[in-house]
Image (cartoon, helix red, strand yellow):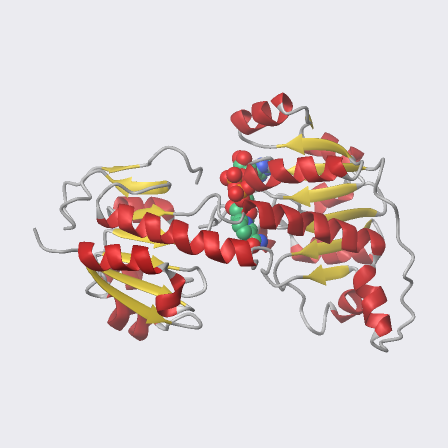
Amino acid sequence: MTRPRLVVLSRRGHASLPDDLRRRLDEACDLTLVRRDGAPDHATAVALLQDADLVGSTNVCLPRLDGPLLDALPRLRGLVLLATGHDHLDVPELRRRGIGVSVLPEYATIAVAEHALAMVLALATRLHLANDRSRGDTGDVSLRGVELAGRTVGVVGVGRIGGRLTQLARGIGMRVIGNDIDPAAVRRAAAGGVQTADLDELLGRADVVALAASHVLGRPAILGPRELDRLRPGALLVNVGRPALVDQAAVANALRTRRLRGYAVDDVVADPRRDADLVREGRLLQTGHSAWWRDEVLERGARMWGEHLLAAVEGRPLDAVTWPRDNAAMELRADALPVAAAGVPE
Ligand SMILES: NC(=O)c1ccc[n+]([C@@H]2O[C@H](COP(=O)([O-])OP(=O)(O)OC[C@H]3O[C@@H](n4cnc5c(N)ncnc54)[C@H](O)[C@@H]3O)[C@@H](O)[C@H]2O)c1
């Protein structure tokens, strides 16, 4: 059997994998590590990946894997992501083509839940604005905030991150309501003592709404104009999932009409001109997808990624979203029967 060819795209090149796992990968496959700071254009992606049976990548280094690129990568059998979210991928199409996808579901859970709590605290205390003022940025923005103890946080998406957030929020004396579309997640939350409610009820009762739900490519926002209208006046909203979970125009409107007191999102969503007032007033707080960027997550992620890459090379993928049954041959077979592996929701 020929050795599988694995191409790994990351910002840190060699340093993105622990030495021992890199050595084991070198023994098990033809490994090429490519250092990249951002997305390749189509021609560069083809040049980098056309000989690969397996690709390892961060979402930053390969944010698009569309039809024309897939057509140009006939050998590709699997994609091993250094990421939890995979909503940029058309999973049914990858499955149809017999291409597997695996993710790291756990590596950043603690950090992202802590980040969500930090966002809630920042919106409540307005400490980002106090810091602006200390640096001489003396706008007419009030630093007056609110206390959180005794208030209710509604967590939408009580999976790994949302579940952890419910514990953290209780730790500062908040009441917690949870919501999820997955009955198993609802059951787990309820077993952990979290009161659960449907989305409309949660929105009507929560002082703070925290979005920690996964997103699927093409699925509409969870919070559109109708849902935002149900919020209690002066509610806070934080989003550590994807920006697409929220209708951005509707949220800007809710901030301007003061139905929402603040919105924090772990991305950059503001239009520099249209939303400048909201950013200046600190009511739109953007953290640029930094929730996972922690010492421990980098170390944990490198090791987990190395283990997932090795597992994929050895034909026993871990945490697969989808993976073709016959992976060991490392050859795209027309009769390969793609299956969705258990364990990771799409
Ligand atoms: N900001 C970051 O740095 C960062 C890092 C990791 C993950 N994330 C995002 O956080 C998301 C959640 O991560 P996780 O590890 O908790 O995933 P998870 O799969 O453990 O939990 C997500 C939960 O959301 C639920 N859900 C999906 N759609 C929903 C809806 N419409 N309403 C209610 N619940 C819904 C799912 O059923 C699931 O229980 C990821 O999908 C990713 O988009 C962000």
Q: Quadrant of residue 186?
A: top right
- For the view shown, which residue lies furthest in the left direction? 1
- Given residues 106 and 217, the one toward you in this image is 106
Residue lying furthest front in this view? Answer: 20
Q: Can you say whether 239 is above or below 277 in the image?
A: above
Q: Residue at x 47, y 56 (%)?
A: 299
Q: Position of residue 250 (x, y in %)?
A: 71, 53
Using the image as rendered, state which of residue 319 and residue 266 is in the foreground.
Answer: 319
- Is 196 displayed left or right of 283 in the figure? left
Does 259 appear above or below 319?
Answer: below
**Horizontal and vertical percent for residue 321?**
37, 42
Q: Nearer the viewer, residue 143 or 345?
A: 143
Residue at the (37%, 72%) spot, across then down? 35
Q: Is residue 172 left or right of residue 66?
A: right
Q: Residue at x 85, y 47 (%)?
A: 234
Q: x and y percent of residue 237 in the render?
A: 73, 48
**Would residue 74 be visible to someone looking at this image?**
no
Residue 333 in sight here: yes
Query: As drawn, is 208 to the left or to the right of 52?
Result: right
- The quarter of the image holding the C terminus is top left
Q: Quadrant of ligand 1?
A: top right
The mark total stands at 0
Q: Is residue 250 above or below residue 328?
A: below
Instruction: Please give left or right for residue 280 compared with residue 106 in the image.
Output: right
Residue at (55%, 58%) from the top-left corner?
A: 295
Tell me residue 81's x, y (percent).
39, 53
